[in-house]
Image (tube, grey):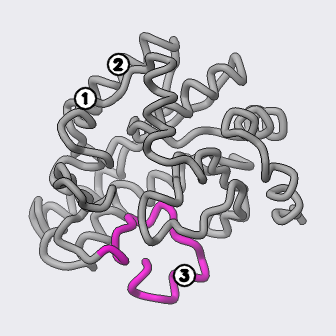
Amino acid sequence: MTDIFRINEELSNATAQEVVVWAVKEFGSKIALASSFGAEDVALIDMLCEATDSPRVFFLDTGRLHQETYDVVERIRDRYGLSFEVYFPQTNAVENLMQEKGPNSFYNSIENRRECCHIRKVEPLDRALSGLDAWITGLRREQSTTRGELAKVELDESHGGILKINPLMDWTEEDVWAYIRSRRIPYNKLHDQGFPSIGCAPCTRAVKPGEDLRAGRWWWESPEHKECGLHIKVDSEKNADKR
């Protein structure tokens, strides 16, 4: 059994770049970065490309992304010469949802929003992680109340007990942007329009001055509900408010 406590102890003083290097050496082709092409993810793509000549990066195309997200995908492809692994929702599931509940059912209730997220993001993620021993995310503790207890390395029991690596766990937003600017990394232009967190177009808005970093995600819901299901631990699924 993997000793998560020991690994986190060994990596306690490691930089984000060092955590990425460790992860690549430890898991080789059996690790991939999950990217939504937000600020944290483009920084991690840069680190991953520095750490290995054969980086694996995947993203979940929900079918409802902003054009600016596709634009940065193209710029990152050109910059690093990457070929991304792309996962789409199952066609039948999307068709059934649209026919039964229409295009905007997620606004009507938390249950409907979670259903949409499950179809467009959670199920595709399950396929993306199949066969992997570990995955890398851009999660940070500062992002929301639901992420305050993040560790650099976690056991992801929701996906068969693979490891989940969070190199930027203790980074601030300022750290992320300092890295992007110092490396001149392409980024999503919506960040310049007040979007610190970017997801599907209907579920993301710019934040107002002084608002939480993820206030623009599912803004019609209370903060403790603001997860799409990609980063929920098995033991928390028993609590309906945290699914």
Task: Say which residue appears at 38% left-offset and 64% top-offset.
Answer: 228
Q: Which label sits in the foreground, 2 or 1?
A: 1
Q: Residue 61 lies in magenta, yes or no?
A: no
| Segment tinted magenta in the rendering | 223-243
Secondary element under disc 2, as helix, strand or loop, is helix
Q: Distance from label 3 to label 2 (Cα)?
A: 37 Å
Q: Residue 228 lies in magenta, yes or no?
A: yes
Secondary element under disc 1, as helix, strand or loop, is helix
Q: Which label sits in the foreground, 1 or 3?
A: 1
- Return the x and y of residue 72 as percentages of the image width and height: 33, 25
Q: Distance from label 2 to label 1 (Cα)?
A: 13 Å
Q: Which residue is mark 2?
A: 74
- Return the x and y of residue 74 as percentages of the image width and height: 35, 19
For disc 1, the neighbor class at 10 Å (few under 14, some 14 to 19, many from 20) is some
Q: Amino acid at mark 1?
A: Lys
Q: Which residue is mark 3?
A: 236
Q: Nearer the viewer, residue 115 or 47?
A: 47
For disc 2, the neighbor class at 10 Å (few under 14, some 14 to 19, many from 20) is some
Q: Which residue is mark 1?
A: 189
- Return the x and y of residue 211 as percentages of the image width and height: 24, 60
